[in-house]
Amino acid sequence: MTEPRKTPLYDLHVEMGGKMVDFAGWMMPVNYEAGVAAEHKQCREKAALFDVSHMGQVELHGENVAQKLESLCPSSFQPLPEGKARYTFFTNPEGGIMDDLIVANAGDHHFVVVNASMRDQDIAHMRSLDIEVTELARALIAVQGPAAEAIVAAWVPVAQSLNFMETTTAQMIGADIRISRLGYTGEDGYEISVPEDRVVDICRTLLAHPDLELAGLGARDSLRLEAGLCLYGNDIDNSTSPVEANLTWAMQKKRRNDGGFPGAEHILLELENGPRRKLVGIKPDGRAPARRGVEITTVDGRIIGKVTSGGFGPTYGGPVSMGYVETEFADPESKVALSIRGKPRPATIIKLPFVAQNYKR
């Protein structure tokens, strides 16, 4: 077995008391001394800094990159203006989701960010196209929360003028960066791609602000769960379709009508007839969370689905879960049961998200 890789911020995490674990082949902090709940609260009320350098950063160069990328994804990239980013996913021939990713039109190339656990697969997949695919050796940090704009714009003034899903290049404390207004917490904020040899200095400078603290994977997960955001490998994977996962908003009208991507036959049929199951929010009664793998049943005990993500929502103030149920039970306010340690626990289907998203649009 190979040793987990370390991001350029590994030593800083250790110095700051990070509890380090192997995540997708990388040593990453689950939390710091304050704990997950405090880091979650920090992001919701002020701002948190996350190390996301384990994610894959890729540049795509060549002729007709946008058009060629559409042969792998059910999203439209040809009309995407320069400086705009788009959430999308690779689909397989059966209509399942191979991975979700962010694609940005960077002018003379496209900038892509893929999940850490799927980076090798995704890069090989893009190399099947007749384009130049370059994996970047750069760090990636995320500054998320209502104070993110003030903190980042003090060093990168253009940050203030960016709207949600917009991206540009800039200078930050003497370093060349790419800054994108997006993230994975449901809060306003930025992902910033920076040179590896400058990321520690940049983070220390940002963390000098009284409203910014480091946060780890634990808070990142509870934040995205409250915001109703899917985690690849849990809520979406090769066996789930975009229709089942309520992700058809990422498929522009032309692609929903014309197809031309892997699995289009299956996905367009689901769009027409409806899927057999849907991803829903689930509110367990009481305080005990229902975690991944818990079976969802009807009130009289018939199995109708399974929880894919679950835990305690600090902002929501109670347990929160997501999972797939048969479509006839997917309506909000439907009553279901959760089989926890062999005992049925009552729960209610709710409309996602649990906590409203606060993006700057």
Image (tube, helix red, strand yellow):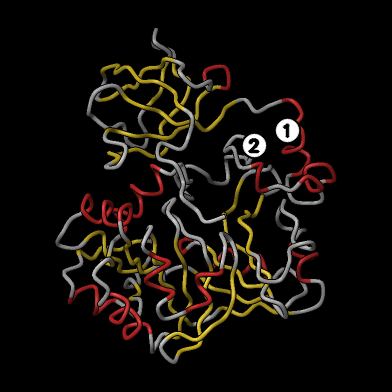
* Label 2 vs 1, first from the N-terminus: 2
| Of residues 75 and 28, the one drawn nearer to the viewer in this rendering | 75
Is 161 rendered above or below residue 108? Answer: above
Q: Quadrant of residue 342?
A: top left
Q: In the rendered view of the protein, which quadrant contains the C terminus?
A: bottom right
Identify residue for label 2: 243
Q: Residues within 10 Å of mark 2 (few under 14, many from 20)?
A: many
Q: Quadrant of residue 88?
A: bottom right
Q: Secondary structure at mark 1?
A: helix
Question: What residue is at 53 percent from the left and 73 percent from the top?
Answer: 57
User: What amino acid type should be assigned to the residue bearing mark 1?
Assistant: Leu
Question: In the image, 208: left or right of 86?
Answer: left
Is 187 rendered above or below residue 138? Answer: above
Q: Secondary structure at mark 2?
A: loop
Question: In the image, 16: left or right of 251?
Answer: left
Question: What residue is at 43 percent from the left and 29 percent from the top?
Answer: 306
Residue 97 pos. (x, y %): 60, 48
| Of residues 58 and 80, the one drawn nearer to the viewer in this rendering | 80
Q: Quadrant of residue 143?
A: bottom left
Residue 211 pos. (x, y %): 27, 66
Is 321 rendered above or below residue 43? Answer: above
Q: Residues within 10 Å of mark 1 (few under 14, many from 20)?
A: some
Question: What residue is at 35 percent from the left and 50 percent from the top?
Answer: 221
Is 66 rendered above or below residue 310? Answer: below
Q: Are marks 2 and 1 in contact (CB under 8 Å)?
A: yes
User: What amino acid type should be assigned to the residue bearing mark 2?
Assistant: Val
- Distance from Cα at disc 2 to Cα at disc 1: 7 Å
Per the rendering, the mark at residue 271 is 1
Residue 316 pos. (x, y %): 32, 37
Residue 27 pos. (x, y %): 30, 69
Q: In the rendered view of the protein, which quadrant contains the N terminus?
A: bottom left
| Of residues 206 and 126, the one drawn nearer to the viewer in this rendering | 206
